[in-house]
Image (spheres, helix red, strand yellow):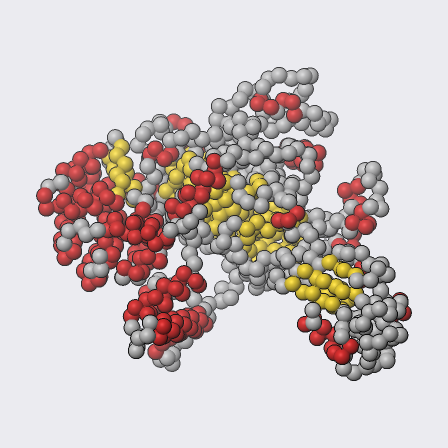
Amino acid sequence: VVVEDQPDVSAVLSAYNQQGDPTLYEEYYSGLKHFIECSLDCHRAELSQLFYPLFVHMYLELVYNQHESEAKSFFERFHGDQECYYQDDLRVLSSLTKKEHMKGNETMLDFRTSKFVLRISRDSYQLLKRHLQEKQNNQIWNIVQEHLYIDIFDGMPRSKQQIDAMVGSLAGEAKREANKSKVFFGLLKEPEFDVPLDDEDEEGENEEGKPKKKKPKKDSAGSKSKKQDPNAPPQNRIPLPELKDSDKLDKIMNVKEAARRVRLGPDCLPSICFYTFLNAYQGLTAVDITDDSSMIVGGFADSTVRVWSVTPKKLRSVKAAADLSLIDKESDDVLERIMDEKTASELKILYGHSGPVYGTSFSPDRNYLLSCSEDGTVRLWSLQTFTCLVGYKGHNYPVWDTQFSPYGYYFVSGGHDRVARLWATDHYQPLRIFAGHLADVTCTRFHPNSNYVATGSADRTVRLWDVLNGNCVRIFTGHKGPVHSLAFSPNGRFLATGATDGRVLLWDIGHGLMVGELKGHSDTIYALRFSRDGEILASGSMDNTVRLWDAVKAFEDLETDDFTTATGHINLPENSQDLLLGTYMTKSTPVVHLHFTRRNLLLAAGAYSSQ
Amino acid sequence: MEPAKMASPKSAPKDAQVMAQILKDMGITEYEPRVINQMLEFAYRYVTTILEDAKVYSSHAKKSSVDADDVRLAIQCRTDQSFTSPPPRDFLLDIARQKNQTPLPLIKPYSGPRLPPDRYCLTAPNYRLKSLQKKVSSSAGRITVPRLSVGAVSSRPSTPTLGTPSAQAVSVSAKVGTPVSLTGQRFTVQIPSSQTTVKAATPTTPTVQNVLINPSLIGPKNILITTNMVSSQNTSGESNPLKRKHEDDDDYDNL
């Protein structure tokens, strides 16, 4: 594919052909400002949304047409009026003073090509339109039509508080139609096992959840109904690897542990066990813990990946080929015999990357480890030989996050090139490319049913992508800073997101709405995790605290609301304080990772920083 | 690392003060003090490079002095070369559309570890032991080879004539293509002279047998280490068969 850079750029920038007399821009803007400030209270909040995009577009137009002094005085006069959460963008904008500066800035270019979306009620819109179509304000009307997309909804105009909760992203809000497609957020049917008897030929019931059975078997503590959940994807919607014997054994262990699981709630909070990385002068940048909490991996800024065993059982690698041929393959403990006792150690260091390691992920079967780095590659390591197996090259820029699918085989990675890629371990090229974000993809997570991928980005939006066809099925706006953590609830219906603005936002995936806002943290939230049954949401942040929130209560009030409204927003109650169950402070250790064990003990990890 | 205190403005040179002001204007408040030095170095190096390029372009255009156009051209060329940015959005959307059209491939059941074809993996050995003479029992590509031989010979002042007891010629070619799964191990291949057979036909007598194979982890160099030495290259002779010679390291340059 031939990329024609220069023609594209000038085509984009030519959208800034002269719109009226440059010296009058200040007049136009202040005229609009005066009109909006004099309008009725109920409309003012909504119409104030226009200030920021108009300001930016008018400024950039002046710069493009090389009216430097007018641009400078325009900026000086009006940049202080903008909302506080746009200050970072405005600072970047202030450094763009010449036309040449604009050509090099990808983010600003994307800002131009994608229309800024505003959601305004019909009444406010009529008011605005009537005013702008009067003769002297025609210029602003032209700019509005050209660079803004106004998504009109029928309903009450929104209050300032409601608007503030949902704006903040680089491209405005999300159009209502972007969040209307059907999403299969239900879980896939798990194969059933008769736990005491270790009966293993039950996959026949797994197919499509049909009630046909060959022989009657006892139900385990799994699904009770054999009917297909209408919100769950069909079993074969995407190809998934079949269960191996070791996977089945693991699942049986899981069920056994689940029976011993602590039921959490507001009056039964989890115990928190914190793993502090001491003397991590190498710079701890990523942490992951296996599902059964047996191993912990740390990715460091010195490009090493270190794996520790959390249990007393040490890490061993398999024997060399010559020795393997000597062991008795039929013995019961063959899996023990293939391990080389001489290599037993608590720590294994993996070398291979040539840049800081920003993301790590264990495979569900604990055989593989993924790590992604600033050198643009994602590496697959074997946890049986502790060597690197594959380097997946595709992003040519730093890769910020990676994660294995809950069923293994697939993994997703997101990086500086603004796309997330879906890979399979046996393909050296990605299977899907999720393109659409305006800035770096900083966080990638699979949905529990492995059919969807959520990505958080530096453009302050969170998008949900369909693995089957690569389409973006949901766009969630509302964060005021880059999104750094995502967590799906175990039932697959809700998504929690955390960003540098210190807020945790809760989203209903099926309806595509923001359903909760948890305020409390004062710094970036790097870790979010739901407990095993979804009763508690734990969040860990750079402000050295772990906070526990009542997830059941946060989501239960929704049952009564009628949010199939086309307005696209519901009234968010101010209940952060009610939902906060506990705040746990560490001694100057930012929290980088959170993990609930199978019995609902909360593990947390971070590197001690001595400031 | 803790953010150290910044140098007092009184003692810092003017350039450093300007740089500190720039950082403040861009909203960066916490930084280590050496960041200013680093930024100044970068600025100096960048401007020098641009001006040098501009001088070249101006002399190519047979102009008497450097003007703004030359500088503009120099900036543009350097930007395309050194500061690449990610692809533009429409290009990404285009390739995404192409890639997302193909259906997800079916998964073959019961196929063991699911890895890409060996060519794309890092599981292959990154060196190969190649023997020139049939008597050498070492097989190619095994780690166990170095363990076979014992003892070392040093170089002898031998002439390329018949009759000189020559040690075996082992040519080791180590190809370091992709980073390997082996951790950095040093293999010392020591070929004893006692196992030699007089191969009268060979004009070159290999003398130095200490070969260090160091499969490097990083760097795609092709290292071909051979012990086929022209005798004239050997300097001092030593009759002690067990003494190692450090001139062996020169051998790496002889291919």
Can you name the residue that lies furthest to the bottom here? Answer: B236
Q: Is residue A456 at least partly visible in the picture?
A: no
Residue A401: image location, x then y, percent? 51, 49
For this rendering, which residue is in front, A498 or B65? B65
Placement of A526 over or under A159, stated as above or below:
below
Horizontally, residue A128 falls left or right of residue A605, namely: left
For this rendering, which residue is in front, B16 or A587? B16
For this rendering, which residue is in front, A27 or A520? A27
Report which quarter residue B43 is drawn in: bottom left
Horizontally, residue A21 falls left or right of residue B93, namely: left
Report which quarter residue A329 is drawn in: top right
Placement of A479 over or under B31, stated as above or below:
above
The structure residue drawn at horizontal position 35% and vertical position 56%, both measured from the top left corner, is: A105
The structure residue drawn at horizontal position 80% and vertical position 47%, both measured from the top left corner, is: A324
Residue A486: image location, x then y, percent? 47, 43
Residue A526: image location, x then y, percent? 48, 50
Can you name the residue that lies furthest to the left here? Answer: A135
The structure residue drawn at horizontal position 76% and vertical position 69%, both measured from the top left corner, is: B227
Q: Is residue B135 at least partly visible in the picture?
A: yes
How many numbered circles are shown?
0
Horizontally, residue A172 falls left or right of residue B151, namely: left
Horizontally, residue A340 falls left or right of residue A482, namely: right
The structure residue drawn at horizontal position 34% and vertical position 78%, both measured from the top left corner, is: B14
For this rendering, which residue is in front, A75 or A142? A142
Residue A269: image location, x then y, percent? 54, 41
